[in-house]
Image (cartoon, rainbow, N blue to C red):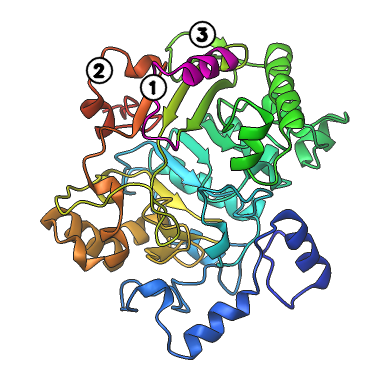
Amino acid sequence: MALGGIRQGKNMASDQLVNELDPTHKNVANELNRAKAGEVVSGIDPSKFWNATDPVHGGGGSPEFPKRTSVEMRIKPEGEILKLLSPEIRIEPTNLCNYTCTMCPRDTHDRDKGCMPMEFYQSLVDEVILMGAKQITLVNFGEPFIDPTLEDKIHYANQKGLRTYLITNASLFHVPSRSQFAKDSGQKMTKIEAAVKAGLTEIRLSFYGATKEEYEKVMVGGKFEQTEKNIQLAAEMRKKYGQKVISPTMKEEMLSPEISMFYLEFSKETTEESEGMKKFLDYTKPFADYIEVWRPHNFGDGRSYREVKAEKTSCGRPFNGPIQINWKGIIVPCCYDYNEEIPLGNVAQETVEEVVRGNAYEKLRESHATGKFEMVPYCDQCDQLCERNDALVISTNPKHQNRERSDIMKSPNTLADFIMEE
């Protein structure tokens, strides 16, 4: 795979590979042609702060990409660099996906598709460590196990003393690893085997449906039986190769990775007392350390499941993080902006600190601080700014026990209680 990026017309073999991996792949030139014609991208008025077609901040990459030689020269030393409030950095290994799940707006996802180059990733990790990062979350909009260097990314972070966390549909666990980590070991191993050996700390399974019919209706493109086998394989690899870590959730010693299960419940009538929900909880017990069942959230201009109310409060992301870096270097506010409609900066051309201190980020923080969310129309559509106590159906996550749902909704992230040292 051409890890530096895959563009339409650049390489026929690369284009074919993208089409095979991602059934929703579109001709990237279509979006560029729209921009040249003066059309507004996804209803957002282009501005000097947020412009999805801006040549500097809207496309990602740089003339020297995947290297960051000129950028690295401007990174401040540890004692002077900006310190993160959230110790978590989210990095998108790839935005390719082999599924077209019903709740996911893959059909309108038309930004460049590819995988983050290893050299670029290492440079970013080295920088955010200076800023106080403690965890790399390898996720955003795609299936991370499609990235042939995913296991190398896990290993690199682990060797630097960082925790790693990812979200996956588990469909590719059984595929042979092509990582350098596997090659250096001199052994043939599957991707999940290599990931566990490389030191993966925590993994979240997206597995929506306890029966073949339910699963394949929602997770279009998925194979129920194979995914079940893959989840069992993950449990076996943990038992065989897991490293002793302190559980991110239980705060007790365990073998890595901690495995959690996330399920989406589309019916508003279903509760934790429903017979189907009880059966599903029983189904997950053999392989999940805990389970959370949520109702789906909105996705930008792609999908709407929850009402966006007039009364809104900041989600806190612009102030506290975590910072989200996409595969080509574009920083966006969060996963809601799946199509990079609010590009806050490009870390292929800027340091992470320069982006965080930049005008685009400052304007986003201003809109959240003043409650003038209309300053950022795309952000103003987000249901995460609204009261959403009905979003959580049931959770066996120890962090959620004996807490009111309104309290849980304030900090639903996996690192809600992970506080930076003074």
Which residue corresponds to mark 1? Answer: 394
Q: Residues within 10 Å of mark 3 (few under 14, many from 20)?
A: few
Q: Name above or below for residue 172 compared with residue 93.
A: above
Of the numbered discs 2 and 1, the one sitting upstream in the chain is: 1
- Dot 1 lies on which element? strand
Identify the residue at image location x=59%, y=32%.
207
What x and y, as percent, mark residue 154? 62, 35
In this view of the protein, which residue sits in the foreground, 137 or 283? 283
Which residue corresponds to mark 3? Answer: 253
Identify the residue at image location x=22%, y=21%.
404
Of the numbered discs 3 and 2, the one sitting upstream in the chain is: 3
Three-letter code, disc 1: Ile
Looking at the rendered image, the quarter that the N terminus falls into is bottom right
Three-letter code, disc 2: Arg
Task: Indicate the quadrant where residue 254 lies.
Answer: top right
Q: Which span of residues is magenta-colored?
A: 266-283
What x and y, as percent, mark residue 149? 71, 45
Q: Name above or below for residue 144 compared with residue 259.
A: below
Which dot marks residue 403? 2
In this view of the protein, which residue sits in the foreground, 292 or 177? 292
Label tally: 3
- Dot 3 lies on which element? strand
Identify the residue at image location x=22%, y=26%.
407
Q: Name above or below for residue 107 compared with residue 409.
A: below
What x and y, as percent, mark residue 392? 35, 29
